[in-house]
Image (tube, rainbow, N blue to C red):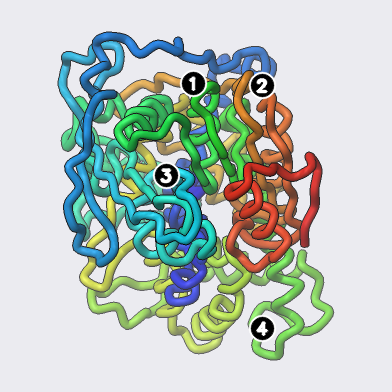
Amino acid sequence: MDTRRLPRSASRSVSRSGGLHRRARGGGRTAAGLLATAALLVSACSSGSSTTSATAAEEAALVALPRSTPAALAPYYGQKPAWRRCDVSGFECATIKAPLDYAKPSAGDVRLAVVRKKATGPGERLGSLLVNPGGPGGSAIGYVQAYAGIGYPAEVRARYDMVAVDPRGVAGSEPVECLDGPEMDTYTQTDTTPDDAKETDGLVEAYRTFAEGCGADAPRLLRHVSTVEAARDMDIVRAALGDEKLNYVGASYGTFLGATYAGLFPDRTGRLVLDGAMDPSLPARRLNLEQTAGFETAFRSFARDCVRHADCPLGEAGTPPEQVGKNLKAFFEKLDARPTATGDADGRRLTESLATTGVIAAMYDEGAWQQLREALTSAMKENDGAGLLVLSDGYYERDADGRYSNLMFANAAVNCLDLPPAFDTPDEARRALPEFEKASPVFGEGLAWAALNCAYWPVHATGEPHRIEAKGAAPIVVVGTTRDPATPYRWAQALAGQLSSARLLTYEGDGHTAYGRGSSCIDRTINAYLLRGTPPTDGKRCS
């Protein structure tokens, strides 16, 4: 599933969610629709249907690379970026090369797009601060230009060059492409709650078509877009920037990327903030199940808030969250039988899958709850699905011209390579339905089926679940939000328990990620760490 962070401003305008700060989020944005939802977050997990077990994952740990740079990689580490003006004022752009295959550096290169905005001063420059909004598949460059480079605290931007590199296969760095706009429209409307064999076959065919499109577009690159390779690319970028250590803020999936860097290069790890943490030790089935429960927790918060407002279409004051959920589920089932009009120029109607994606998108940020109430009211009482379609399109990063960013394509490419699929067959997914529906009566069925997508991927996974300890790294700040829908709080606790130098910082609240979302306590604590190197006391809590 998608775990990116959206900027708050973005989520207001399209009612999106996710991990970008203010949020252009996290993963950057966050969102990828229901079809890809489970797949997005799965990038840090492993197969629940394979022989890999939680116990085995707990015993395996990421091994640090040798401190010395291999001779074959020396040309990459010796690069000097040729900076040029970007199209966005105030930013400089460059291209840095990395080996396609680290095991065979002579086999070709990957071109990585890098952007920076120089420290504005006053004060002594502290080096570069890399940022990543999550996903996987969220554009770090889009995030830094739309939010971090202009919206991070002024004192942070004064002391650091704000830097972003799109990971391999993402946005500006040789993006993976799978389907065109009309094909993606069809894909996003696929029924993700099949009622019979015919509908199940239709869902499987959608996954196969998507996977085949990705395989045809980038057959070589698709084998080399793992999180480990992206983390190794960041070390080349660090060297090219002239920094001895990597300073980094990662949100959502970006926490997995950052933790992986720390595990591979603990001696080069500087000040790392991992906000909305993922647990890399979980098998895929458990990871997806816990995320499903996380969305249920967030929905219950929304439900309690919704019924306090006169315009809530899901219940009146005092209606319990369980009944609110039943009312929403009944609406989804109605759409499954008869999609409603949206006024869309391309003729799309609001299907159950699009409506579910729209609701999930709003769970990432409580600032989108009012928009969700209005969209649900229009759809349920006026048969106008336009509002929910806007939320869903924002989640999928579909523009008004019907074009999609490569978020969903990169998301699947990374997730399906990082770990084996949660389910290998439709029968396995169907048998898991009771467990998923218990975790979330509202979203469980769709999220269980969404976890099937990697079963048809054209490239076998190269990763497995594992612990990341990063022994010898400087203090790392791990941030968890107690009612985070996409990265449940328990994951932050788990990652903090694995990293040898972690300090757990807790935000008691709603929404996906915490930094830059309105808590002065969180922001002060993280700013003190980034600016003065003062980590919080382990276990510090903010509200």
> In front: mark 3 or mark 2?
3
Residue placed under numbered mark 1 in the picture: 264
- Nearest to N terminus: mark 1 or mark 3: 3
- Nearest to N terminus: mark 1 or mark 4: 1
Look at the numbered discs 1 and 4 and tell me whether their residues touch, using CB distance below 8 Å.
no
Instruction: For residue 282, say whether it is visible.
Output: yes
- Nearest to N terminus: mark 4 or mark 3: 3
The three-letter code of the residue at mark 2 reads Ala
Residue placed under numbered mark 2 in the picture: 54
The three-letter code of the residue at mark 4 reads Cys
- Nearest to N terminus: mark 3 or mark 2: 2
Cα–Cα span, label 2 and label 4: 41 Å
Cα–Cα span, label 3 and label 2: 37 Å
Q: Residue at x 62, y 29 (%)?
A: 474
Q: Position of residue 401 (x, y in %)?
A: 21, 71
Q: Residue at x 65, y 59 (%)?
A: 523
- Nearest to N terminus: mark 1 or mark 2: 2
Q: Residue at x 45, y 79 (%)?
A: 387
Depth order, front residue of 161/210? 161
Q: Is residue 349 left or right of residue 73?
A: right
91 shown above or below 229: below
Depth order, front residue of 518/218? 518
Instruction: For residue 194, say whether it is visible.
Output: no
Q: Which mark is residue 128?
A: 3
Cα–Cα span, label 4 and label 3: 46 Å
Residue placed under numbered mark 4 in the picture: 312
Cα–Cα span, label 1 and label 3: 19 Å
Q: Position of residue 532 (x, y in %)?
A: 63, 47
